[in-house]
Image (cartoon, rainbow, N blue to C red):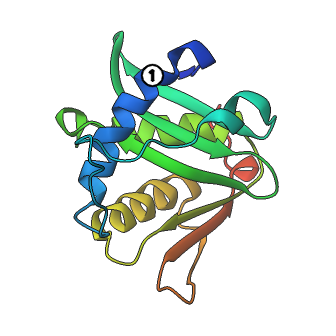
Amino acid sequence: MIELVRVKQEDEAILQNLIQFYIYEFTVFQDIKLEQSGFFAPFDLKPYWTEADLHAFFIMHEGELAGFAMVESGDPNVILEFFIMRKFYRRGFGKAAAEKLFGLFPGNWSVTQVEKNEPARNFWRKVIGDYTGGNYIEMFDDHNRSIQEFNSGLYAKK
């Protein structure tokens, strides 16, 4: 079972640690360099503690950190970052976490993947396709990023 646990400001260091794994995996798709410290540049998480429309969640499985999700709520709601630890791949945890996010923020959604990230494109197409019964729009922007748009309020899981 998957739980979404809102990240508290006092847990920022834990989220920054998970973000290091996320960025590491992302280096396959974009040219990101390590800092002199041997770490990737940390995310600026300050807005998550002060802005009402920014939300960070730990994705938990049986008390263990399985990943994180960062969302901007609004019209549309936007998945800013989404990460599942590799040991939890292909077990339905990413799908379960995404569906919980869609339910937390009913309404229009926009989910974007960078051009070279085919695994993410495939994941989101499958998750959103299953969630909406295939009733979503996909487009590509000027940077060849794929974007899926749909309304989660129409498909709320009971």
Foreground: 58 or 38? 38
Percent coordinates x, y for residue 57 in the rendering: 55, 29
Decide: is 95 above or below 131: above
Foreground: 52 or 122? 52
- Drawn side of residue 79 relative to residue 121, left or right: right
Which quadrant of the figure contains the N terminus?
top left
Foreground: 139 or 24? 24
Residue 109 in sight from this viewpoint: yes
Secondary structure, mark 1, is helix
Q: Amino acid at mark 1?
A: Ala
Residue visible at 58% across and 51% down in the picture: 79
The residue labelled by disc 1 is 13
Foreground: 87 or 158? 87
Outermost residue toward the left in this view: 87
Residue visible at 26% across and 47% down in the picture: 36
**The image quarter in which residue 105 lies:** top right
**The image quarter in which residue 64 lies:** top left
Percent coordinates x, y for residue 82 in the rendering: 45, 46
Decide: is 151 above or below 73: below
Please rate how many residues cluster around mark 1, counting C-alpha atoms within 10 Å: few if below 14, some from 14 to 19, many from 20: few
Outermost residue toward the top in this view: 63
